[in-house]
Image (spheres, rainbow, N blue to C red):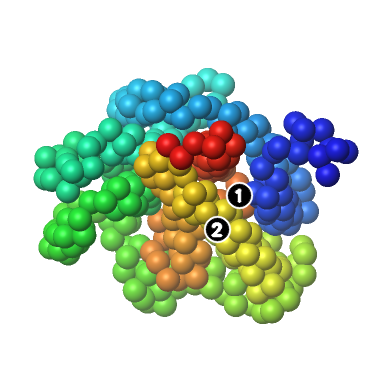
Amino acid sequence: MQTYVPKLIARQPWRVVLPLLGLVLFGSAVLYSAAGGSFQPWAVTHTMRFFVFLAMALVISRIRPDLFKLAAFPAYAVILILLILVEALGFVGGGSQRWLNLGFMTLQPSELMKPAIVLVLARYYDLLPAGEISSWRAMVPTLGLLGVPMGLVMLQPDLGTALAIGFGAAIVIFLAGVPLRWFVGAGAAVAVIAPIAFFTLLHDYQRKRVFTFLDPESDPLGSGYHITQSKIAIGSGGLFGKGFGNGSQSHLDYLPEPHTDFVFATMSEEWGMLGGLFVLFVFFLVLRWGLRVAQNAPDRFSRLLAAGMTLTIFFYVCINLMMVMGLAPVVGIPLPFMSHGGSSMMTNMICVGTIMAVERWSGERRGSGGLG
């Protein structure tokens, strides 16, 4: 095969690039239909963003492990400063203050914190002697590295992104070898604090989302409208769907945000259960690839990095699908590689590029015959 294919092409990670390309093109078709049969304003930009961020991911995949380690704490600090600037200078959109206008682009720093928290904690536990991981002294810096960005994101307010940051961090902490009793204790603390936080810290619209999740039919034309219409769209698609371009829920504007948070419902109405199984199968391939890369990683840092990035993508997928099917409150988390949105596409491609890098490190280690 390599006799006929140039090495530059043959050595690319096609086993993950091709499934992602298929998913993005399928997503572009859904966005084309959601726009009433028009490539603008969503389908073209969605596809173009993928190729731009794919190039970025391939560049990331060529970075050496020592550079990743060197950049971990500085990158975290820069993004933390950007989060602080959001509070001071950011503009409000959709009722939240999450974005910075950089002139040439609009940046959502909280999205960058998702891979950054995985990177910085992987580096922290890589530096930490194995015998100290279970000590309470080791948890103090961990809680500081996690608590500050989560607090800043909660102030925006953006509960979904804060949970995503916390999930990625929890995965790295668990896989690093922190004793299970710490997680049991944290769970007990959350169980005590959650009811108090629910009534004192959450905004009215956030509390309403939880009540809507518990009983969406109580206000089908108000707070329960989103999830009710989403379930109607998914259920009406049946096995084979209504056909491409024939989705009444999105075309007649019954389904809110058909191109972002509820793109899976838009797709399911037109492509049915078979379309949904295709989407799940592609995500299965990508996540299985990421976990295998983590399993075969050459050292602790690489293993934590690949696993954290893989499960960050998993969090996006899991929460979005549960959300649109009424199994979780609506928290505004897009579906990777299908929803229209530059920030989420960038975050997920950073994760993919980092996993590619770990895979390359493993290959180089095997090729050199070293076991570390």
- Amino acid type at mark 2: Arg
**Left or right of 246 on screen, residue 228:** left
> Which label is found at residue 288?
2
**Quadrant in which the C terminus appears:** top left
**Mark 1 falls on what kind of element?**
loop
Say which quarter of the image contains residue 188: bottom left
Image x and y of residue 338, in percent: 62, 52
Residue visible at 86% across and 38% down? 3
Residue 249: x percent and y percent?
63, 67
Q: Is residue 267 visible?
A: yes
Q: Where residue 273 sits in the image (x, y, percent)? A: 65, 74
* Left or right: residue 131 compared with residue 323: left
Nearest the viewer among 337 and 334 is: 337
Which residue occupies the extreme front position in the image?
A: 369
Q: Residue at x 56, y 33 (%)?
A: 368
Indicate which label's residue lies in the foreground, 1 or 2.
2
- Tell me the residue at 13%/45% (across/down): 135
| CA distance for labels 1 and 2 | 17 Å
Q: Is residue 313 visible?
A: no
- Please give the name of the residue rendered at 50% of the width and 27% of the height, measured from the top-left corner: 64
Pick the quarter of the image with the N terminus.
top right
Q: Is residue 23 above or below residue 65?
A: below
Looking at the rendered structure, which numbered label has been put on residue 311? none
Q: Which residue is mark 1?
A: 337
Amino acid type at circle 1 is: Phe
Q: State if disc 2 and disc 1 touch (CB < 8 Å).
A: no
